[in-house]
């Protein structure tokens, strides 16, 4: 048995032990050769600090204001799909942990708990992420999110088509899950996960299991599981008119796209390459962050590759307002459910605190590129 986990990598190890291979590979994998996964991590590792000395860091602060709300640390639990296959009611467990921790939680369109069930189960800051599979369905989901009290809508813009995730292809991953001798044997070797599946049932895409979705064209789009590749800037402008609250656009890696979002009146942008799950050769979001920060005064979030509190400090120093946590909190969820998510959040917050002390910065809001080595070349490699 592993000793008490001390970092996110340890929770990844625990998740890998608990989950069948087909499920862990869905959580852990990326597109094609998975060079993008490595790049996301490597670009964080390439950024080095220039610590200040003889600074009073006896008291440190990491709370921030994000989109008009005070949060305990510059972290948001990112929207991720099919979380119920990692832990029963996975979306609700993530949402509860975020609420207790004092940070926002974003629910995916592809969640296994519905918008309404998550809203009822937790009282924290609740965001909703929109995939546009079908225009009428998207409008319905937006209305449901608004009615459920979601404060922020996120349009994910980097899934015109689904990425080629070769681990999933080899494993035959999909919903409904297909069983063969290999997957059954793997399930037997992971009895805790299998018991939860047998007692709770196979998770479904809860937001699509609605009496309102009776339109034959919508149902056909859902069966194909393909995104609407025609969604464009004009459609974003219409979405802006439709949604009265905060609107973010996720999946950007170019500063001109950031500037165009700004001109259309969105409230913030999320620099992301979908965690390396879409285009294997895409630039790492942390590389694009400095140019994005120069292109807008809007709040900027960044994701992909965050595994340490130091990564979060680096992102804030480069101009981000907060980071999205995807796999990091999912490893905690898959390992130990709600408690695992809380432990990962505590670990990251502790690492942020230690990093701030080590670099001589008492308040995370005071971070700048001056704390980083070779600041003129960051993001230009």
Image (spheres, rainbow, N blue to C red):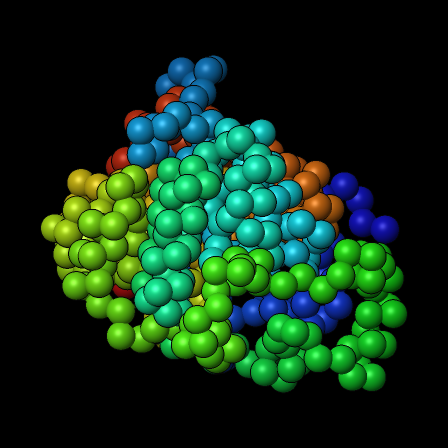
Residue occupying the point 45% across, 20% down: 60
Residue occupying the point 31% across, 75% down: 229
Q: Is residue 26 visible?
A: yes
Residue 256 vs residue 268, the one in the foreground? 268
Q: Quadrant of residue 234?
A: bottom left
Residue 339 vs residue 60, the one in the foreground? 339
Residue occupying the point 59% across, 49% down: 91
Residue 250 placement (x, y as % from top left) = 34, 56
Q: Is residue 57 above or below residue 21?
A: above
Residue 297 placement (x, y as % from top left) = 18, 40
Outermost residue, left side: 263
Q: Is residue 11 visible?
A: no
Residue 227 vs residue 141, the one in the foreground? 141
Residue 293 appears left or right of 185: left
Residue 259 placement (x, y as % from top left) = 15, 53
Q: Is residue 341 above or below residue 364?
A: below
Residue occupying the point 37% across, 69% down: 134
Residue 78 appears left or right of 346: left
The C terminus lies in quadrant: bottom left
Q: Quadrant of residue 370?
A: top left
Q: How many marks?
A: 0
Residue 50 placement (x, y as % from top left) = 35, 38
């Amino acid at each position: 048995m592993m000793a008490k986990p001390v970092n996110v990598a340890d929770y990844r190890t625990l998740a890998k032990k608990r989950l069948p291979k087909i499920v862990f590979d869905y959580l852990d994998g990326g597109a094609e050769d998975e060079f993008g996964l490595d790049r996301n991590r490597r670009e964080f590792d390439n950024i080095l600090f220039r610590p200040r000395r003889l600074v009073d860091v006896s008291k440190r602060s990491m709370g921030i204001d994000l989109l008009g709300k005070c949060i305990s640390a510059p972290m948001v639990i990112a929207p991720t799909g099919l979380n119920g296959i990692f832990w029963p009611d996975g979306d609700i467990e993530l949402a509860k942990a975020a609420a207790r921790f004092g940070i926002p939680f974003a629910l995916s369109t592809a969640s296994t708990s519905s918008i309404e069930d998550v809203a009822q189960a937790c009282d924290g800051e609740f965001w909703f992420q929109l995939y546009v599979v079908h225009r009428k369905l998207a409008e319905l989901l937006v209305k449901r999110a608004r009615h459920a009290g979601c404060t922020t809508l996120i349009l994910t813009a980097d899934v015109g088509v689904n990425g080629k995730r070769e681990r999933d292809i080899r494993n035959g991953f999909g919903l409904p899950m297909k069983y063969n001798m290999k997957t059954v044997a793997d399930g037997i070797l992971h009895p805790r996960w299998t018991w939860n599946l047998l007692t709770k049932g196979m998770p479904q895409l809860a937001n699509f299991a609605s009496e309102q979705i009776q339109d034959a064209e919508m149902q056909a789009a859902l069966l194909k599981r393909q995104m609407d590749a025609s969604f464009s800037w004009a459609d974003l402008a219409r979405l802006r008119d439709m949604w009265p609250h905060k609107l973010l656009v996720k999946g950007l890696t170019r500063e001109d796209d950031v500037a165009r979002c700004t001109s259309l009146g969105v409230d913030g942008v999320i620099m992301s390459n979908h965690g390396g799950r879409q285009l294997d050769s895409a630039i790492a979001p942390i590389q694009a962050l400095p140019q994005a920060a120069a292109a807008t005064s809007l709040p900027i979030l960044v994701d992909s590759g965050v595994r340490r509190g130091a990564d979060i400090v680096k992102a804030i120093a480069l101009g981000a307002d907060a980071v999205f946590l995807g796999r990091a909190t999912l490893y905690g969820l898959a390992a130990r459910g709600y408690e695992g998510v809380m432990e990962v959040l505590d670990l990251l917050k502790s690492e942020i605190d230690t990093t701030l002390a080590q670099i001589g910065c008492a308040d995370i809001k005071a971070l700048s590129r001056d704390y980083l080595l070779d600041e003129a070349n960051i993001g230009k490699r």
